[in-house]
Structures are given as structure tokens and as C-alpha cells.
Image: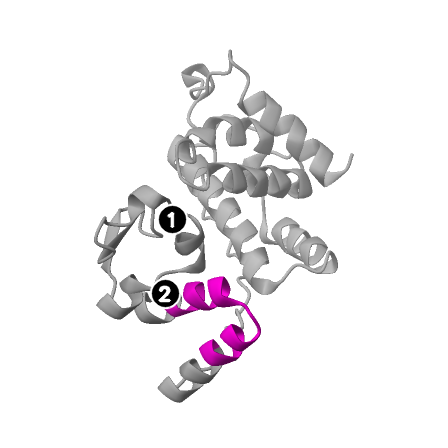
Amino acid sequence: VSTMREAKRLQAVFKAPNYVPRAPDASQGTNASQSLSEVAREAYVMWKGTKDEKQSLARLDAAVSLLGPTVDIGSLDAARIDAMVTKLANKGLSPKTINRYLASTSKLMKFAKRRGYISGDLPSLPWKPEDEGRIVFLTEQDERRLLAHMRAKGMDSYALCVEVLLVTGVRVSNLLGLRPADISPDYQWITLGVTKSGKPQTVPIPAALGAS
């Protein structure tokens, strides 16, 4: 069964109207055997309602599929996790993306540990070093040349967006998500409804930029 197909199947189970996360069976003791897919069903509530719920669940589902949905989570070891990482790397995923899958796996194991499904120590995870890439800092002259070049090419709207990014320091995703209601009537403030911290943020706009 393909990873994507299995992930979609598990997600359909999680989102079923009659789905209720299972509680540990006290009659079997705290170390009752639970498969990865069963624990994932219980752990689904940890991501429910978060801003990246859909993406997080997709990674969780894919990780469970790669590790083995029927595998007892108490027997999940470093070798099986290493095998998952190898499969992800063979798919061409970046170290940063692989670490996101490991983060989902770590969160799932910690949840299982709290529920009593894992009695021993949690296996160590092979976190990948993340390459931040080349960081280039633009001087004021570089900024002016960039904006002038864009306007000379008739890209005035794009130049305005770039200028807002340079002056305010907001993220591209926040800028693209702006609505007319997020801009003050006097064009002196913009309100970012959802930032990376999950809280709204108000950012001042210089008068010269607001006038444009």
C-alpha cells in the first residue's frame, strides 16, 4: 500500500463523525499493547484546532505508514526510525522536511509514553543538520536598485510589495494574506491577523510608503 494512500485512509478514520479517541484499557494494565495507528488515532487531538492541523496530520499519517501501522508502539526502536529516515531521504526530501517527520514521531512517542504504552526509554532520533542556505543582506543602495529595476520593467505592483516587505519586515505569507480591512483608513498601520506566534500583530507603515 502506498504511503499516500495509507495516510489518506488513516486521516479519513481520524475525521469520521463517530470517531472518539480511545482511552487506555485499565483491565490490560498501563503497558497494554497498542499499534502505531491506534495510538495515532488517540494522539490526533493534540493537533486538532492548530493552525497547521492539516499539514501536521498528513506528516503524522505518512510517518505511521512508513514505520508500520500495525507495529506495536512499545517495540518502536531506533532501527525502524532510521529506516523511515532512509526512505524519506531516498524520496529526495530535504533535511529540514525529514526533521518535521521526526518531530511528529517524537510527539507521538511522548504521547504514548504518557499513556503508558511505552514502558522503557524512548529511542533517540537521528535529527538532521539543517542548512540555512546563503543569507544575503541588502544595503540601502541594493534595495533602491532592486526597486528601480522592477519599476523600470513595469512591475510597479510587485515593487510595492517588495518595498512593504523591506520596510516592515513582515513575512511574505502575512503580506499575501492581507485584506483591505487589515489596512488602517489613513494607511499608517497594517494588522496581521495570524502570525507565526499565533497572535495578531500591528505594524506601522512609513508615511511615504502609505501614500503610495
Nearer-the-camera pick, 209 or 137: 209
Give residue 2's position: percent from left, percent from top.
76, 38
Which range of residues does the magenta coloring cover?
Answer: 147-164
Among the two numbered marks 2 and 1 on one chain, the one whose residue lies closer to the N terminus: 2
Give residue 183's position: percent from left, percent from top.
29, 49
Q: Are marks 2 and 1 in contact (CB under 8 Å)?
A: no
The kind of residue tagged 2 is: Val
Task: Residue 192: tell me if it is visible.
Answer: no
209 w.r.t. 29: above or below = below
Nearer-the-camera pick, 139 or 85: 139
Secondary structure mostly seen in magenta is helix
The kind of residue tagged 1 is: Leu
Task: Residue 3: tell me if it is visible.
Answer: yes
Instruction: Please say which color scheme the image uses.
Output: one colour
Q: Residue at x 23, y 55 (%)?
A: 189
Nearer-the-camera pick, 161 or 40: 161
Quadrant of the snapshot with the C terminus: bottom left
| Residue 164 circle label | 2
| Residue 209 circle label | none
Give residue 198's position: percent from left, percent from top.
31, 46
Q: Residue at x 44, y 85 (%)?
A: 142
Q: Secondary structure at mark 2?
A: helix
Q: Secondary structure at mark 1?
A: loop
Q: Is residue 154 magenta?
A: yes
Say few, some or many: other residues with alpha carbon within 10 Å of mark 1 (under 14 / 14 to 19 / 20 or more).
some
Image quarter of residue 94: bottom right
CA distance separating discs 2 and 1 = 12 Å
| Residue 178 circle label | 1
